[in-house]
Image (cartoon, rainbow, N blue to C red):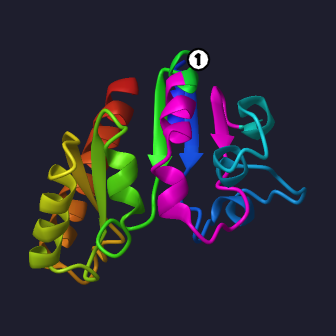
Amino acid sequence: AQELGSIGKKVLLLDADIRKTAYVGRLGVEEEVRGLSQFLSGQANINDIIYETNFENMDIIFSGSFAPNPSELLGQEAFGTLLGAVREHYDYIIVDTPPIGSIIDAAIVAKQGDGAVLVFESELVSSKEAARVKEQLLMTGCRLIGAVLNKVDVKKNKYYHRYDYYYHGYQEKKEVTKKNKEK
């Protein structure tokens, strides 16, 4: 999201993990914030829940306070209304959801989106589980844009280690060539 903002695109990060948010702590927010759960339950309007960040062209909607019925809230018409309203003001809306494999919230949100990117943690999800999650997402009718494998231990895995070696070796050769040309 930060990279899109840095190239001049207006970005909204929407935290739809009403069960277990991490953004307030991760971003060091000390004040009490109103968020998605308050909007969906009628306790706040759209202008009350959009916060500016110190990242260029990036705003955020926090998940808000814990709600006992997140799936029900996300499935209401109000979520679609919110997305429709913010689409007019942002080039990209990135919705972060809980894991699709264990909680239905992500599948509910996926129906409202233009596309989804699956994120898998290396060595935590089997290929069989990843395939099951992919099929579950496709059943919602949402377009799958791609997948990301994160937290890869490049020192442990020979394939990634080799890629890392060649990439950095290439970068070093490129720098040497530049320095030699300057002389």
159 vs 148, left or right, is left
Which residue is found at the position 28% from the left and 38% from the top? 115
Which residue is found at the position 63% from the left and 32% from the top? 58
68 vs 102, left or right, is right
Q: Residues within 10 Å of mark 1 (few under 14, many from 20)?
A: few
Residue 87's x, y, as percent?
50, 22
Q: Magenta stretch? A: 55-84
Compared to 3, does 172 lie above or below?
A: below
Residue 116 seen by the camera? yes
Determine if the magenta segment contains residue 56.
yes
Q: Quadrant of the C terminus?
A: top left
Determine if the magenta segment contains residue 97.
no
Depth check: give the residue in front, 55 or 170.
55
34 vs 31, left or right, is left
Residue 175's x, y, as percent?
35, 40
Residue 5's x, y, as percent?
55, 28
Task: Name the residue carrying label 1.
Answer: 89
